[in-house]
Amino acid sequence: MSTPATAHEILIVSIARLLHGTRHVAVGAASPIPAAGAMLARALAEAADEPKLRLSILGSVTHNFFTNGSAELFDCAAQGRIDAFFLGGGQIDGTGNVNLVGVGDYPQGKVRWPGSFGSAFLYFHIPRVILFREEHSPRVMVEKVDFISAPGVSEKGIWRKGGPYALLTGKGLFGFECERPGFHLQTLHPGHTLEEVIAATGFDFSHDATPAQTAPPDPTTLALIRGRVTDELHESYPDFAATLRQTVTQHSLKEQTT
Amino acid sequence: MQHPLDRLAAQVAPGMKLAVPVDYGGVPMALTRAIIERDIGNLHLVCVPTGGMQVDMLIGAGLVKTVETSAVSLGEAGGAPRFNAAVRAGEVHMLDATCPAIHAGLLAAQKGVPFVPIRGLLGTDLLANRPDWRVIDNPVREETDSDPIVLIPAIHPDAAIFHAPMADRFGNVWIGRRRELAAMAYATQTTLVTVERIFDGDLMDDEMTAAGTLPALYVTDVAQVEKGAWPLGLWGEYEGDTAEQHRYASAARTADGFAAYMADSQQKGAA
């Protein structure tokens, strides 16, 4: 019998579920978990005989079919050819604003992060932008971001076809309601509680009285993650693929000894 | 005899607006060291569309006045320490952008037009801090309601520098599918290129190589420098030296550590 899903595997299966039905998913360069989730979604679509899911990993040679330089990703998004993308964020607030620039007063803040990358453009074009940040703490999930790299919502009359679709953290999964606007806690990952999530979140969000738990992957899906997906991941993210394998082994040893 | 690298570096002047490629696109690290040795300062860097170790080193060496970029980071090796410190200390002027805005500015220069409109950006603090970016009401809209759209002015670098796998003796440079290198060259009058090797023949003779070639028309000068992107990688040629990248990342956490790293590696380069 296989060992239960690890925390990373819960995130990977959550991402695959969010990507169900998409045709083309783009993943940033340093995003092994989103890449693994997209690879799993692709494998599941294949197994269910659903339309092929195309995956572009920026910076990868094998998983990148662009031939028009680094501008092509943005052109592709503008043409409506990318269904889903991932954004992280040093800060994320309750209306889906994302800050990739820094903490404090711009430009000479307390902390400087790399910068906004393509977020200020892609957030407007890609229908399913999944906000993904493993760290779920009050310093990341803030009431109001210090700098808006990309806004969660736009005023009426502003051209916009994309935006936040979900927020996935190490503690739970939120959906985004753009009418309010705000997040709704959909599920808690195994081992986490509503009280804990409320305490770790700097913004208000809606939730059921007793939120459901994020369903672990079924045995077939778990086998796909530990087999095909980890193998595919190895090309672009060798270190992370090795970590995944190691965590499963440790997990399994722990199970045997307890 | 003058090293070809010195000949290239001599064509970079203080105060220039310099277009530099993304970390995985072919960064001329050897040329960057030559620029640092010559102490060519007051530079305005245009990162196409993001910067990495090259930008961090130029900033650490005190040679940069303005950084126009969508991001600066060392990728897997973490944040860019000299960049972050310089921004916090107000030592560099920031022109924060988003990737497609940099591409749009270069495209405008390529087309010889004053600006290119792009979607997105409205409601961001990027736009709020870029008075050079203008918002107009889409003049060709079909609906009667207003349709605000951002105009990105043309970016005209004084020079573009990059590293590529090969060039021929006629000055044609093979860039494969890294088309942003061509976009950089189209936008400027001075393009300085280092290459791994010289192709013995004419890259334009064969349609297979011609399709991925930047013609000599756009190329000012070429120098052959093996491993010219080290410690970064070069697509299709070699991987980045991650151990060296981490060594830099940890040394450059302090100004002293950065200076020691640079002195050490210049000695190595001279040896």
Image: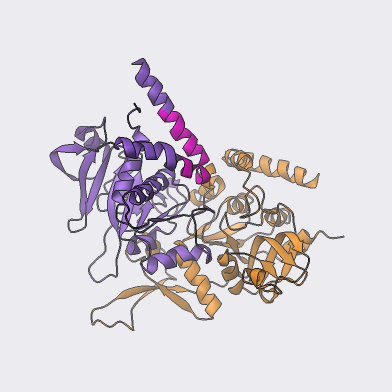
The image position of residue A31, as x and y in percent, is 44, 46
A246 is within the stretch colored magenta = yes
Image quadrant where residue A179 sits: bottom left
Q: Is residue A46 left or right of residue B253?
A: left
- Chain identity for the colour purple used in the image: A
Q: Measuring 21% from the left and 57% from the top, which residue is drawn there? A: A178
Q: How many marks?
A: 0
| Colouring of the image | by chain
Q: Measuring 48% from the left and 50% from the top, which residue is drawn there? A: A29
The image position of residue A195, as x and y in percent, is 20, 33
The image position of residue A10, as x and y in percent, is 32, 37
Residue B134 or residue A254, whichever sits in front: A254
Instruction: Looking at this view, name the residue that lies furthest to the right.
Output: B1
Q: Measuring 26% from the left and 63% from the top, which residue is drawn there? A: A154
B237 is within the stretch colored magenta = no
Q: Which residues are magenta?
A: A231-248
Q: Is residue B208 left or right of residue B180?
A: right
Instruction: Looking at this view, name the residue that lies furthest to the left.
Output: A209
Residue A231 or residue B220, whichever sits in front: A231
Which quadrant holds the N terminus of chain B?
A: bottom right
**Overall secondary structure of the magenta section:** helix
Whether residue A202 is visible to the viewer of this picture, yes or no, is no
Residue A36 or residue B217, whichever sits in front: A36
The image position of residue A20, as x and y in percent, is 30, 52
Whether residue A87 is visible to the viewer of this picture, yes or no, is yes
Judge whether B128 appears above or below B151 on screen: above
Colour seen for chain B: orange
